[in-house]
Image: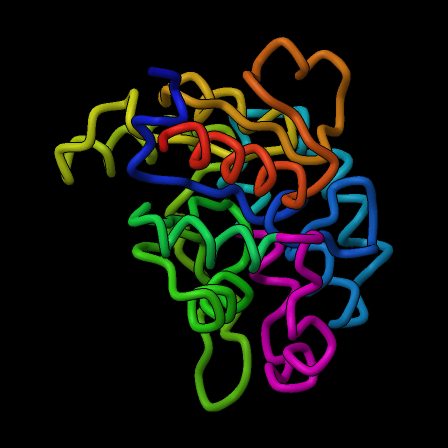
Amino acid sequence: MTLLDNIKLCIFDMDGTAVQYANSSFQSSWDAVGIAAGKEEEWIKRRDYYFPKHDLYQEWFDGNCRLLEGIKVQPILDEVLPPPYTHGFREFCRYVKNEGVKLGLVSSGVNLVADCINEDVGLDFVVANMLHVSEGKFTGTGEQHVPLWGKGKVVSRYLALNKIDFKQAAYFGDHENDRGAWSRVGLRVGISLKNKDLHSCVDYQFNDFKGALELFKKIAKQRF
C-alpha cells in the first residue's frame, strides 16, 4: 500500500496553488485586490517589507485592511472574479470527490476569492482570512483566521477536530509559508513551486493539477 491508497482528505493552499493571479511571483489574491483597488504601489511596497518578517503579519494584515477602507466591493469583485484557476484544479477536485475524498482549503488569502472557489467546486471546508464589508464597502477591518506562517497549526487543528489521521491527509502548496502545513500531513504535494529549496519538502511536484490528476488516476487503476 502506498501513501496515495490511504488518502481521505486533500487540503489546498489557495494563492499560487489553486489559483494563480498574474500580478506577481506570489500570484496572490491579496495583491489582486490591492491592485484592483488602485493601491498597487503602496500595496506591493508593504508586501515586500513585511513578507520576511514572520512576527509582524498581524500588523501587515491590519494595514492592508485599512488601505481598503471606504472602497466599493463590487468593482473589486468584477476585477478579481472568477478566480484564475491553476490548470486542472477543478478537474482534479471533481475526480477525487467522486473517489470519496474530502476537499478543503486553508489559505492566508482573501475570503472573497476562497468563498467563490467553495461555491464553484463544493469544498468540505474553507478557512481563509476575512475582509469586513458593510453597505457594499470595505470597512477597513478584517479577521485573521490563517496566519501567513501558521498554516500548519490550522491544518492540525482541523485533522484533530475531525479525527483524521495525518497519514490520511494530503496538502498541496507552492511557497515557503506552506512548509508548516506540509509537515503535518502524510502526502506532501508541490504545485508550481516558487523556490527550488522547497523540492525537498514534498513527495511529488507538478507544474499544475493535470500532473496530480494523472498520478491519482494511475494509483486508482493499480487498485484493481
Vertical placement of residue 14 versus 49, above or below: below
Image coords of residue 131 (percent x, y): 48, 65
Which residue shows up at 75% across the image and 21% down it?
195
Asked if 219 appears above or below 186 in the picture, the reply is below
- 28 falls in the magenta region: no
Q: Is residue 61 left or right of residue 133?
A: right
Q: Measuring 65% from the left and 66% from the top, which residue is drawn there?
A: 83
Considering depth in this image, is 24 or 192 the residue closer to the camera? Answer: 192
Q: How many numbered dots are placed on residues in this image? A: 0
Q: Quadrant of residue 3?
A: top left
Quarter of the figure with residue 21: bottom right
Point out the residue furthest to the bottom here. Answer: 135
Residue 2, quarter of the rendered image: top left
Q: Is residue 120 left or right of residue 16?
A: left
Quarter of the image containing the N terminus? top left
Tell which of 73 and 84 is nearer to you: 84
Q: Residue at the right extreme? A: 41
Front position in the image: 156 or 96: 96
**89 over 206 or under it: above or below:** below
Query: What sort of colour scheme is used for the picture?
Result: rainbow
**Residue 105: image x %, image y %?**
43, 49
Indicate whether 21 appears above or below 54.
below
The answer to whether residue 78 is magenta is yes
Please state, as top left, top right, bottom left or bottom right, where the C terminus lies in the image.
Answer: top left
Residue positioned 14% across, 38% down in the render: 161
Residue 37 in the image: state x and y as whole percent: 74, 72
- Which stretch is magenta? 62-88
